[in-house]
Amino acid sequence: MSEEIKDQLAGQASEAEIVESAPAEPAIEVAEPEAEAASEAETPAPEKKNVAASLVGKTIAELSEIFKEFLSSDDKMVRSHEADSIKSAFYRTLGEVRSKAGTVVDETLDSIEENFKALYADYKRQRAEYNREQDARKAENLETKKAIVEELKVLVDSQEDVSALFPAFRALQDRWRETGPVPASDFRDLNNNYQFNVERFYDKVKISHELRDLDFQKNLEAKEKFCEAAEKLSENENIVSAFGELQKLHEQWKEFGPVAKEFRESIWERFQAATAVINRKYQAHFEEIKGQQKENLEAKTHLCEQLEEIVAREIGSSAEWAAASKEVLDLQAKWRTIGFATKKDNQKIYERFRAGCDTFFAKKKEFYGQFKSEMDDNLAKKEELIQKAEALKDSTDWKKTTEAFIELQKQWKEIGAVSRKKSEALWKRFRAACDTFFDARDKSGGAAGGSNFYANLKAKKQLIEDIKDYTPSDDEAVNQEAAAKFAADWQAVGFVPMKEKDAINASYAEAMKEKFPFWHEQRGGRASRGESRPMSVKDQLVRKYNALQQEIETYENNIGFFANSRNSEAIIKQMRKKIEKSKEDLAALKEQIRKEETE
């Protein structure tokens, strides 16, 4: 327990003793909430809470400056709770900053912390010296008051004329009031001894009624002012401050002697009534704080449960870690908006929450440590594929090299992610090598048995124009034969560049649909090249099924090829839609083929 808290508890005990030792007047009970245990050391007063609230959101540098300003104040020794609040806020904020920084060493933070430590250590030395001085002063006051009591005894036992003794008696009372506090352990006996001899002076010494009545009147006037002050305190919204002021009034009340007998009971009841009002408010205030602290504990427990649920998750990707981190930071922000729990629970619930945060960020750090290692391995693998692709890009062995590039593209797709800073550059190198080879192959006609893709494209465009120029005959058989020939000619033409395939096929289908509606309904050409009769429905379905399967494989291969390109999202999205649609058509074709086989 700190010296300040000890002093506070001792001060409260002495105040209660003042009330209990009132001679010749009814005793008053200055009740403290929940008996003797309530103190500012156990339950934060609004002033302290306001100080702590004002520090929320401050940076460690700002908190350090606030502490420097505090050290320059003249009354810093009696505001020790502010020093403790600033220190608590400083290290809490420093811990949060370092938690976010992870293992990165920040020399600026270390410097600010060391400077703050030095300032706080100097303040602690000053405060220890201040406390020692206060203890020494109390010890001196004790000896002074003991001497006053001894002088009072001599005065009471003196047989001199009362008129001569009374000024000396007043002087002793004034000296007693002017002398400061004494150690709490000596207060009761010393005060009782003093009050006993004061009463002896009034009751046993033969003083004149005129002087006694005058003294009674002065005491009454003073105590009426104490009653007015106590009644005014009941209007103070800061009940903790009001309660502290009330204890001072009780202390001062005992410094004055009795009043006339007819006023003793009434003046004391008035003072007691004002005291009771403040005591009730004081009790209610701490009951309210306890209720709020209970709600705060429940709210913080709920945050701990949410945090522990996040910690228990199996998180396997950067995106999931980013989302979970945001949730944890949001919980930390909510935590800072909730006030203290009860003293016995506040530290426990904080340690539970802190442990959850530490576990979460430790798991995150471990994940990214492994993730970085995996990305380094992936980087090495992709650089190896790039070297192979660049070595093959100028090859003219079209068939063998095409197969090699397809295999390289497949391997590229299977390799995981690399650092975002290097991903785009790696992809551009790999894509450039692939494009160099395939562009050269297509222009030279080095694929599909030596046919030229661009020549095939030109031939198919001409064939579409021929279909459009065809004039349908009135003889349906003639039209059937013409459609079959156009279809056979189309199939005879080789492959076109991949990027032109969809557009040219669509143009062909549209031209055939316009000139030969019956052919469009059949959705097929001839059963085989060179046949003069139309294909059967089943043959047409099987042929379309096989073509559709080949298209799906091509699309899927292209998705793997484009997957790592930053600017290919739209292309990949379009391909995925085509794959989904083609698979739906494939399932429908399979069902149609099954029906044809059973009929």
Image (cartoon, helix red, strand yellow):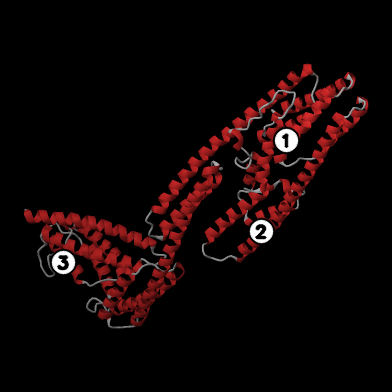
Crowding near pointer 3: few (<14 within 10 Å), some, many (20+)? many
In the image, residue 209 sits, relative to residue 130, either above or below, namely above
Q: Upstream in the sequence, badge 1 or badge 2? A: 2
In the image, 50 versus 457, the foreground residue is 50
Counting other residues with Cα less than 10 Å from the Cα at mark 1, is it few (<14), some (14-19), or many (20 or more)?
A: few
Q: Secondary structure at mark 3?
A: helix
* Residue type (three-letter) at the residue carrying disc 2: Phe
Q: Residues within 10 Å of mark 2 (few under 14, many from 20)?
A: many
Along the line of sight, which residue is nearer the eye, 210 or 123?
210
> Which residue position holds label 3?
485
Mark 1: secondary structure? helix
Q: Is residue 278 left or right of residue 442?
A: right
Q: Residue at x 25, y 63 (%)?
A: 552
Q: Residue 232 appears in which quarter of the rendering?
A: top right
Q: How many marks?
A: 3
Q: In the rendered image, which residue does mark 2 sit on?
A: 116
| Residue drawn at 9 percent across, 64 percent down | 533
Q: What x and y, as percent, mark residue 388?
A: 34, 80
Q: To which residue does mark 1 refer?
A: 189
User: Going by the image, does 203 lie left or right of 250?
Assistant: right
User: Which callout, 1 or 2, points to the residue nearer the camera?
Assistant: 1
Report whether 314 appears left or right of 157. Answer: left
Q: Is residue 345 left or right of residue 571?
A: right
Label 2 residue SS: helix
Q: Are marks 3 and 2 in contact (CB under 8 Å)?
A: no
Q: Amino acid at mark 3?
A: Lys
Task: Give the residue at the far top of this rendering.
Answer: 262
